[in-house]
Image (tube, grey):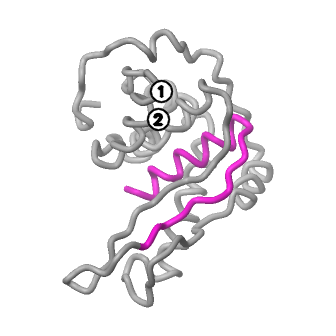
């Protein structure tokens, strides 16, 4: 599910015209069972608050579009980012991000598949040959090239209402979508 989450961030960022550096796996310390602590993140650049909110929400939206639900634990850092910016209505943000991702579903699937393939190729799934540090799974250039070659459409975020994103919304559990 983490590949769908990061694919959501990366796909929406490219679709709204932002630059993505890459999707990364951060390999942490080795655990007692011999495995490694692994986290994932997408590095992108956006000065526009509307775009930052949508991209932050797009991780959960990517999970929702591709699997029908999203995991609260995967979205925790994204929710915290919104709250730090003064926005409380994460559900609204995810809903709009999911609508935008559905417009580029083929790209979302292609990015997710590229992330999964990299995770296997680099040994992240089997956790063999790992050492602490950041590993690039898919570059932003690769994602942008796929966007262009698929004829994906630019996402229009004008329907996103900042005032609604600021409102306190009733809390939903991720599996209530």
Residue visible at 68% across and 24% down in the picture: 156
Cα gap from disc 1 to disc 2, whole angstroms: 13 Å
**Precedes in sequence: disc 1 or disc 2:** 2
Within the image, what quadrant is residue 54 found in? top right
Instruction: Say left or right for 22 vs 162.
Output: right
Per the rendered image, the range of residues in magenta is 1-27
**Was residue 18 drawn as part of the magenta stretch in this picture?**
yes
* 112 on left or right of 18: left
How packed is label 1: few (under 14 Cα within 10 Å), some, or many (20 or more)? few
Please name the residue shown 44% across and 50% down the image: 5
Residue at the (58%, 31%) spot, across then down:
100
Q: Nearer the viewer, mark 1 or mark 2?
A: 1
Left or right, 173 with respect to 65, comes to: left
Q: Is residue 66 above or below residue 143?
A: above
As helix, strand or loop, the secondary structure at mark 2 comes to helix
> Is residue 177 a member of the stretch shown in magenta?
no
Specify few, some or many for label 2: CA neighbours under 10 Å numbering under 14, 14-19, or 20 or more. Answer: many
Measured as percent of width and height from the top left, residue 121 is found at: 53, 81
Residue extending furthest toward the bottom: 129
**Disc 2 target residue:** 57
**Mark 1 near mark 2, Cβ–Cβ under 8 Å?**
no
When the figure is inspected, residue 109 is found, relative to residue 49, above or below; the finding is below
As drawn, 89 above or below 113: above
Exactly how many numbered labels are in the figure? 2
Rendering coords of residue 21 (x, y %): 68, 56
Q: Secondary structure at mark 1?
A: loop
Q: Mark on residue 85?
A: 1
Q: Which mark is residue 168?
A: none
Say which quadrant the N terminus sits in. Answer: bottom left
Residue 27, given in percent of the width and then of the height, sits at 43, 73
Q: Quadrant of residue 114?
A: bottom right
Residue located at (46% from left, 44% from top)? 59
């Amino acid at each position: 599910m983490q590949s769908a989450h990061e694919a959501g961030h990366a796909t929406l960022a490219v679709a709204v015209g932002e630059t993505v550096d890459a999707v990364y796996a951060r390999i942490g310390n080795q655990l007692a069972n011999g495995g490694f602590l692994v986290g994932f993140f997408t590095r992108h650049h956006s000065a526009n608050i509307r775009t930052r909110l949508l991209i932050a929400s797009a991780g959960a939206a990517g999970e929702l579009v591709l699997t029908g639900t999203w995991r609260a634990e995967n979205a925790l850092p994204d929710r915290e980012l919104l709250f730090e910016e003064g926005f409380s209505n994460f559900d609204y943000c995810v809903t709009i991000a999911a609508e935008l991702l559905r417009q580029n579903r083929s790209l979302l699937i292609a990015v997710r598949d590229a992330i999964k393939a990299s995770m296997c190729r680099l040994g992240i799934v089997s956790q063999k040959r790992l050492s602490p540090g950041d590993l690039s799974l898919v570059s932003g250039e690769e994602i942008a090239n796929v966007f262009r070659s698929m004829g994906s459409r630019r996402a229009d975020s004008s329907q996103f209402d900042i005032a609604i994103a600021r409102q306190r919304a009733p809390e939903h559990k991720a599996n209530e979508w």
